[in-house]
Amino acid sequence: MLTREQNELLCRVEGDAPMGGIMRRHWLPACMSEEVAERDGTPVRSRLLGENLVVFRDSDGRLGVLSEYCLHRRASLVFGRNEECGLRCLYHGWKFDVEGNVVDMPSEAPGAAQRLGKKTRAYPGRESGGFIWIWMGPPEEMREFEPPAWAPQPGIRYAIVKMWTECNWAQVLEGSIDSAHSSTLHSTNMPAAQDVYGSTATDEAWLRPSNDKAPRLQFEATPYGFRYAAIRQPIKNPETHQYVRTTLFIAPFTVLIPPNNRYNLAQMLVPIDDVNTMFYWIAWHPDPAKGITQDAWRKFCAAEVGVDIDQNYRRKRTLANNFLQDREAMKRGEWTGIKGIPAQDMAMWESMGPITDRSEDHFGSSDLAVAQFRRMMVAAAKKYADGGPAIGTTEHVAHVKLASFEGVVPMSVDWRTLGVPGAEAPVTAK
């Protein structure tokens, strides 16, 4: 449990909040690359840590990330014309380049832009792993950009789900690192199966080799955050083998969750502001023969634009309409009556309120990872507030070398060796 003061420290990210300061010492995803793929294309609205931004790609293919509001009279640049290497405000025609420089002021005397020498707020941008990343921290502290875990090499095919979530970022992240809930909440989508030896993906479900709903959790702190194992009894060979699923928390907002036989999985739980989060779920595989297409991934997750979510990635299944829960389907055997794994999660997260009162929680043994996350991040916020470095910035760890794991292995195998580069692959049950 946390006190209310600790809860505020964990959750708040806007303004001078310590947790927001930690976030600003990491590269943050502003949007997906596909949203700004076109040169001189439609500008995209983004919001991070309580700041409204506009993202665009100029005539030369350069990325621009600016404050959404025009420096002149604060009209939104999302409506602007993206042309001739700059973004032009519709109101009076002030034009900004990707670095935020005012390059034209047609409503003023000739040469006014050059004489004024003004700049709007602009953030450095990088493109990698299907995302546009920005640095929102002090320029003098800008860290070298490092590719995410899902970009170990060029040419990887990414499938990305993006959904706006109406609750605090920590609430969402706690769900991502909570392995125990998947056996219950997602039991219709992740059913136990007799003839599989690891998570096996079909077009409709991920079959599992275990019906054990009470995993044993073991934890290991790391320089980047932590990793832990959820260990279950497998259906086959339970006397000699164990079903292991490892999850990695890469501070401050990324989680590598256990893969299946077709693709690896990661989530980013990025604070939009104090009470909203952008949920990203990435599926990928370095082997081009594996993976999943963008359309198939979004269909599986019930996150298709125009079907399940609107153009702003807001869901049609909401708390206000009870996530369109189908009680008749529940009578026929479906567990939740809610379509799609993400929406099932979001129904739980948002039902707690925008910022849940963690002082009222009553933990069990399956909440080990959640408890560790809270302790770690509250301590990190206090350390940062006292002038210390942001968590995850003092010791370099190449994220592309990190990996989660799942599979049935002999009981003699130490889970800490699983998913580690260079470690010998365990012999799985057959």
Image (spheres, rainbow, N blue to C red):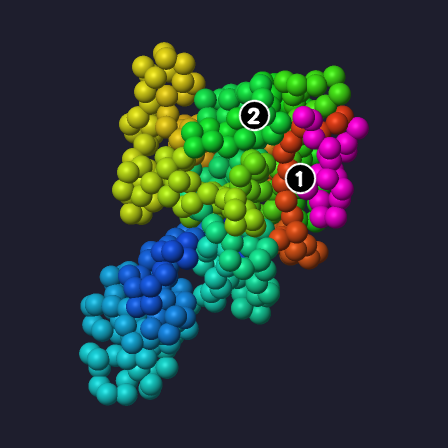
Residue closer to the observer: 308 or 425: 425
Q: On the image, numbered disc 2 is attached to which residue? A: 208
- Is residue 420 covered in magenta? yes
Residue for point 33% across, 40% down:
304
Q: Predominant secondary structure in magenta?
A: loop
Which region shows up in magenta? 412-430
Quadrant of the snapshot with the C terminus? top right
**Seen in the image, is 55 located left or right of residue 384?**
left
Q: On the image, numbered disc 1 is attached to which residue? A: 227
Quadrant of the snapshot with the N terminus? top right
Q: Where residue 22 appears, x then y in whole percent?
A: 57, 53
**Seen in the image, is 406 located left or right of residue 104?**
right
**Residue at far right of view:** 412
Task: Please rate how many residues cluster around mark 1, counting C-alpha atoms within 10 Å: few if below 14, some from 14 to 19, many from 20.
Answer: many
**Seen in the image, is 95 located left or right of residue 123?**
left
Q: Answer with the quarter of the image where residue 374 lies.
A: top right
Residue 106: tell me if it is visible: yes
Disc 1 element: strand
How far apart are labels 2 and 1 at the CA level?
A: 21 Å
Disc 2 element: loop
Q: Where residue 223 appears, x then y in whole percent?
A: 70, 49
Q: Answer with the quarter of the image where residue 98 lies.
A: bottom left
| Number of the front mark, 2 or 1 | 2
